[in-house]
Image (cartoon, rainbow, N blue to C red):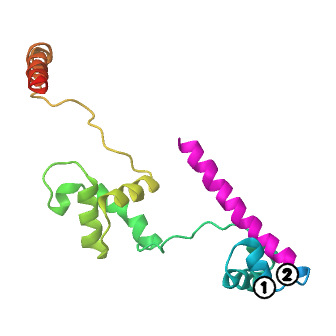
Amino acid sequence: MKNETNKSSSQTTDLREYRRFRAWELHQQRWKQQVIAEALGVTQGAVSQWLTRVKDEGQQALHHRKAPGAKPRLTLEQKKRIPELLKQGPEAFGFRGDVWTRDRVATVIRGEFGISYHPVHVGRILRDLGWTRQKPKHRAQQRDEKAICCWQEERWPELQKKQMKKDTL
């Protein structure tokens, strides 16, 4: 399904680019903008913008360009400081426990730089900086393997049976 979407999007981009270049060709053949617009099924304003773009930037300006997106709110220097801040540990910023979460990092960024980010975007920033999700190096000392095994083998199946009974009622 995803490939079909990408293919469709690619075809749409190709069609749009084709229309821009075709408008330029027709303009060179001395067609009027209104006639070009009608022939290509676009507005006269679109044709005008394309021709202006060629005049200002050259014919390569008709090629598809990726949308630039929003300007980053963190400067490059601020972004480089994030790992230094995180190396201090969460407790240095008033959090309990020694685990960084995206929410906690978002709070630190807001406190240090006055910039608010959604936790999902913080994850992207951390990934760009080479930080990966934290995984415990070792298991908790109070972990009771026997109790876990018992729960998985006895209690869990009981809970599943009860849920199945509820679903059938």
CA neighbours of label 1 inside 10 A, class few (<14), some (14 to 19), many (20+): some
* Amino acid beneath label 2: His
Q: Quadrant of residue 156?
A: top left
Q: Viewer-proximal residue, 26 or 131? A: 26
Q: At 26% across and 36% down in the image, what residue appears?
A: 136
Q: What secondary structure is the magenta-colored segment mainly?
A: helix
Distance from Cα at disc 2 to Cα at disc 1: 7 Å
Q: Quadrant of residue 19?
A: bottom right
Q: Viewer-proximal residue, 141 or 45? A: 45
Asked if residue 93 is among those painted magenta in the image, a careful observer would answer no
Whole-percent x, y for residue 68 in the image: 56, 70
Q: Which residues are magenta?
A: 1-27
Q: How many marks?
A: 2
User: Could you tell me which secondary element the residue under label 1 belongs to?
Assistant: helix
Would you name the residue on which mark 2 appears? 27
Q: At 37% across and 60% down in the image, what residue appears?
A: 121
Q: Viewer-proximal residue, 144 or 154? A: 154
Mark linked to residue 33: 1
Asked if residue 26 is among those painted magenta in the image, a careful observer would answer yes
Q: Does 102 appear above or below 145? A: below
Whole-percent x, y for residue 157 in the image: 13, 16
